C-alpha cells in the first residue's frame, strides 16, 4: 500500500510560486484528506523597523488575509478540489527570536501534518544571498516531509 497524506499543510504568501504549489499539492488530495493553508505574519521585532509596530502588524495581517483569500479562490477553481475543503489561517511568529520557517514547522507539528507543500522562487546568486530563502530554511529544519514546487518561469 502506498503512503498517503491525511493532512497537507500549504505555506502560502500570495506569490505565483505559492499558487503553483497549491495547484501541485491539490493533485495529492484524495477523499478524506484535510488541507490547511497558512500565511505566516512575521511579527518578530526588528531594531531596523521605523514604523510603529501596530501599523506594521495591521499591514502584515491585511496582506496575509489577502493572500489567503487569493489561495481560497484559486483552490475553488481546481478540478482536484472536488468536495475537499481548504481551511485557511494566519499564523504568527513570536515577537523575539523567531522566523517564518520555524513557524511553518511549528504549525506542521501542532497540526500533525503529513506533508508540507510550499513554493520556491528558485532565486540564485546575490539575490538569494540578500533575500534568503524561507523554503531552504524550512527544508533544513522540517521534521515533516516537504514538497517544494518551483515557480514556473514566466516569459
Image (tube, rainbow, N blue to C red):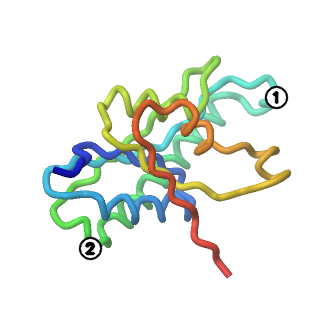
- Which residue carries the number 1 mark? 48
Percent position (x, y) of residue 137?
Answer: 61, 37
In this rendering, position of residue 52 left or right of residue 60: right
Spot the residue most to the bottom: 155
Q: Is residue 58 left or right of residue 36?
A: right
Q: Within 10 Å of the Cα at label 2, are there few (<14), some (14-19), or many (20+) other Cα atoms?
A: few
Q: Quadrant of the C terminus?
A: bottom right
- The earlier-in-sequence mark between 1 and 2 is 1
Horizontal side, residue 122 vs residue 61: left or right: right
Rendered position, 118 above or below 41: below
Point 59% across, 34% down: residue: 42
Q: Residue at x 41, y 57 (%)?
A: 69
Q: Nearer the viewer, residue 93 or 17?
A: 17
Number of dots carrying numbers: 2
Q: Secondary structure at mark 1?
A: loop
Residue 66: which disc? Answer: none
Q: Nearer the viewer, residue 96 or 123?
A: 123
Tell me whether circle 1 and circle 2 mark residues in contact (CB < 8 Å).
no
Kindly state the secondary structure of the residue where label 2 is placed: loop
Q: Which residue is mark 2?
A: 79
Q: What residue is rendered at 54% in x and 27% in y?
A: 93
Residue drawn at (44%, 30%) of the image: 143
Cα–Cα span, label 1 and label 2 = 45 Å
Amino acid at each position: 500500500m502506498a503512503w498517503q497524506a491525511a493532512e497537507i499543510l500549504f505555506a502560502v504568501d500570495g506569490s505565483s510560486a505559492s499558487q503553483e504549489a497549491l495547484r501541485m499539492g491539490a493533485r495529492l488530495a484524495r477523499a478524506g484528506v484535510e488541507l490547511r493553508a497558512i500565511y505566516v505574519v512575521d511579527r518578530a521585532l526588528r531594531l531596523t523597523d521605523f514604523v510603529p509596530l501596530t501599523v506594521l502588524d495591521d499591514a502584515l495581517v491585511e496582506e496575509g488575509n489577502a493572500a489567503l483569500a487569493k489561495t481560497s479562490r484559486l483552490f475553488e477553481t481546481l478540478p482536484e478540489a472536488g468536495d475537499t475543503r481548504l481551511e485557511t489561517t494566519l499564523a504568527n511568529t513570536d515577537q523575539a527570536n523567531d522566523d517564518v520557517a520555524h513557524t511553518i514547522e511549528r504549525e506542521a507539528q501542532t497540526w500533525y501534518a503529513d506533508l508540507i507543500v510550499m513554493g520556491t522562487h528558485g532565486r540564485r546568486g546575490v539575490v538569494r544571498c540578500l533575500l534568503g530563502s524561507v523554503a531552504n530554511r524550512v527544508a533544513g529544519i522540517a521534521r515533516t516531509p516537504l514538497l517544494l514546487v518551483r515557480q514556473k518561469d514566466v516569459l
